[in-house]
Amino acid sequence: MKTSIVSTIAVIAAFTAQGAYAETLRLLTWGGYAPDEVIALFEAETGHTVEVTTSNNEEMIAKLRATNGGGFDLAQPSQDRITSAQEEFGIYKPIDMSKVTADQFIPSMLAATATNTTYEGEVFGLPHVWGTSGLVVNTAMAGDVTDYVNLCDASVAGKVSYRLKRPTLIGFAYSMGLDPFAAYGDTDAYQAILDQVEAKLIECKANVKTYWDGGDEIKNLLRSGEVVASMAWDTGGWQLNADNPDITFVAPKAGALGWIDTFVLPARGRADDAAYDWINFVMRPDIAAMITNTAGNFTAAVDGDAGVSAELKTRYQNSFNQAAIDNIKWYPPVPAGLEALEGSTLDRINAAK
């Protein structure tokens, strides 16, 4: 009996030293966001254990919807998949900011995610991994292309490519001095913006070599020199830069278009302490760098690039100074009906002579 009591006291003391009782964290996340080495360090430091299920946005929502927000303690949907899912299904619970080490987050990203994940006055998401689309440019051949509308300049005629997708509409709108995200709540105002962008993109058709569809296609066009300036993703630009230092990702003057995968608490999660411990742990700069080296995308951690591989860190820093980071236009939730308006606009651009 005495041995049992002593053992119990020792276990309690160990958990107290770690700051909380050990729990099993059931994590629903993307591939690469919870590397084995990070899990091992977290388990050793906190006493918690981690069970990882990898998924994507659609599957995350489906899994949480099927269980009314149960089965997992922490999930990582993109920020534009939170308020609408909460309104319709009630699958999340609010973030308790008193349990979050907020100064570990890049302030502009923390603020943007709070704005885009607030529902009925409460914040439901925190930023984690992020990426952008903007310009991928052969700077030796198209060094004057620094914004989306520059893709229509005579100097790059016939050597431009972008997708006929909604990011192109949004990027050009910002580059034309418009604010499409601010018009999301007003269908007429948004249509007026689309009309102006439509006219610009029809005018720009003579400059376009091709409208690309896949990442390999645009990378091959840039490698060959058939295309010297394009709209594309940051990681693709950095991959090309590894082979040709003249080609790189450029954050447009009007702002790169950004996505953020978040941290959210499922409504019926049962290990909140472990969830908050994980959030605070992986946002430490040293741990954030380990995740970036695995996933290939950067995190919202302050100084999270410090321990990233030298090559990737250099490419990232050449593309993004602090002003460029603060100027990223983060995708907010898309109101019902807007994508139909965009689709009609894109069809007319495609059909125009």
Image (cartoon, grey):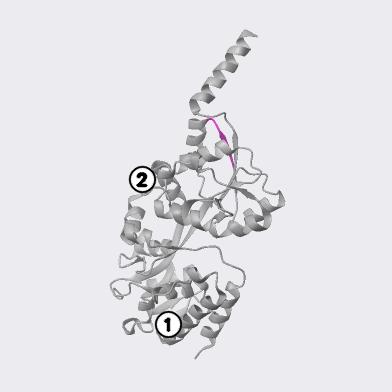
Please provide percent x and percent y for residue 256: 41, 65
Task: Single out the residue that lies furthest toward the front.
Answer: 121
Point 61% across, 10% down: residue:
3
Point 70% across, 49% down: residue:
68
Q: Earlier in the sequence, mark 2 or mark 1?
A: 1
Q: Which residue is mark 1?
A: 208
Could you tell me the amino acid type at mark 2?
A: Gly
Quarter placement of the N terminus: top right
Residue 1 appears left or right of 263: right
Please provide percent x and percent y for residue 227: 39, 77
Q: Residues within 10 Å of mark 1 (few under 14, many from 20)?
A: many
Q: Residues within 10 Å of mark 2 (few under 14, many from 20)?
A: some
Could you tell me the amino acid type at mark 1?
A: Val
- Disc 1 secondary structure class: strand
Please provide percent x and percent y for residue 137: 35, 71
Q: Which residue is mark 2?
A: 307
Closest to the observer, 212 or 326: 326
